[in-house]
Image (tube, rainbow, N blue to C red):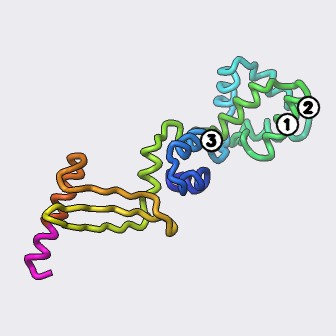
């Protein structure tokens, strides 16, 4: 999910209010789950061993019913999608019955359908910049008494979300370069009879 889509999905009100610290805070809590994939027997055993479980005991617990037998047959062949919406409740039932541990279930589901925090390090500045992409912009240029003033108005959904004012000779080096470039273009346009 792109950052702009995440803002629209998870923090639209905060973005519309221009509170990008709140937007970033909300996005840092977003968790995405991958589409479940089939896992083979070796990686299944490795995942269980990694959490201190006994893979033979956990897999043996599945032999007692038809669903478990089906999963074990698949495990010997193409693999099992441990994170599938029908497999997860089966595993939860094994945990509830005391046949496998919760850490075993969690390891298998994470192996098949890992969760990630794609915006864990997003900043308010990142969110502000992303929110301005594809917004409607109006650039007003005014020269009064030889001083150039540039105003950038940014609108999203008809609502002004940002205003930047740069006076000639003020601001950062990038701001000064922008105003110099605009002033040169304006001078050329006026000289050409604009």
The image shows residue 125 at horizontal and vertical percentages of: 42, 44
Question: Residue at point 68% right, 21% down?
Answer: 51
Closest to the observer: 2 or 73? 2
The answer to whether the residue labelled 1 contacts the one labelled 3, judged by CB atoms less than 8 Å apart, is: no
Q: Which label belongs to residue 29?
A: none
Specify whether 140 is left or right of 67: left
Q: Residue furthest left?
A: 191
Q: Gap in Å between the C-alphas at discs 2 and 1?
A: 7 Å
Q: Tell me which segment is drawn in magenta.
A: 185-194
Question: Residue at point 88% right, 34% down?
Answer: 93
Q: Main secondary structure of the magenta part?
A: helix
188 in magenta? yes
Q: Gap in Å between the C-alphas at discs 3 and 2?
A: 35 Å
Instruction: Residue 114: name its quadrant.
Output: top right
1 in magenta? no
The image shows residue 50 at horizontal and vertical percentages of: 65, 21
The answer to whether the residue labelled 2 contacts the one labelled 1, judged by CB atoms less than 8 Å apart, is: yes
Question: Residue at point 58% right, 55% down?
Answer: 12
Q: Earlier in the sequence, mark 1 or mark 3?
A: 3
Label 2: few (<14), some or many (≥20) within 10 Å?
few
The image shows residue 105 at horizontal and vertical percentages of: 76, 30
Label 3: few (<14), some or many (≥20) within 10 Å?
few
**Tag 3 secondary structure:** loop
Q: Residue furthest front?
A: 145
- Mark 3 vs mark 2: give the one in front: 3
Q: Which label belongs to residue 31?
A: 3
Q: How many marks?
A: 3
**Tag 2 secondary structure:** helix
Q: Which label belongs to residue 68?
A: 1
Quadrant of the image containing the C terminus: bottom left
From the image, tell me which residue sits under label 2.
Answer: 64
């Amino acid at each position: 999910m792109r950052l702009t889509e995440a803002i629209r999905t998870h923090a639209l009100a905060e973005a519309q209010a221009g509170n990008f610290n709140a937007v970033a805070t909300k996005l840092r809590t977003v968790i995405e789950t991958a589409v479940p994939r089939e896992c083979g027997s070796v990686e299944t055993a490795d995942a269980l061993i990694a959490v201190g479980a006994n893979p033979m005991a956990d897999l043996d617990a599945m032999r007692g019913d038809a669903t478990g037998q089906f999963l074990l047959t698949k495990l010997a062949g193409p693999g099992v999608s441990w994170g599938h919406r029908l497999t997860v409740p089966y595993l939860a039932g094994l945990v509830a019955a005391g046949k496998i541990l919760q850490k075993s279930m969690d390891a298998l589901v994470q192996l098949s359908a890992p969760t990630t925090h794609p915006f864990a390090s997003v900043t308010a500045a990142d969110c502000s910049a992303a929110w301005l992409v594809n917004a409607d912009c109006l650039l007003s240029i005014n020269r009064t008494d030889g001083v150039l003033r540039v105003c950038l108005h940014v609108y999203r959904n008809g609502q002004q979300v940002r205003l930047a004012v740069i006076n000639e000779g003020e601001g950062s080096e990038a701001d000064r370069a922008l105003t110099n470039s605009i002033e040169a273009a304006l001078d050329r346009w006026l000289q050409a009879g604009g």
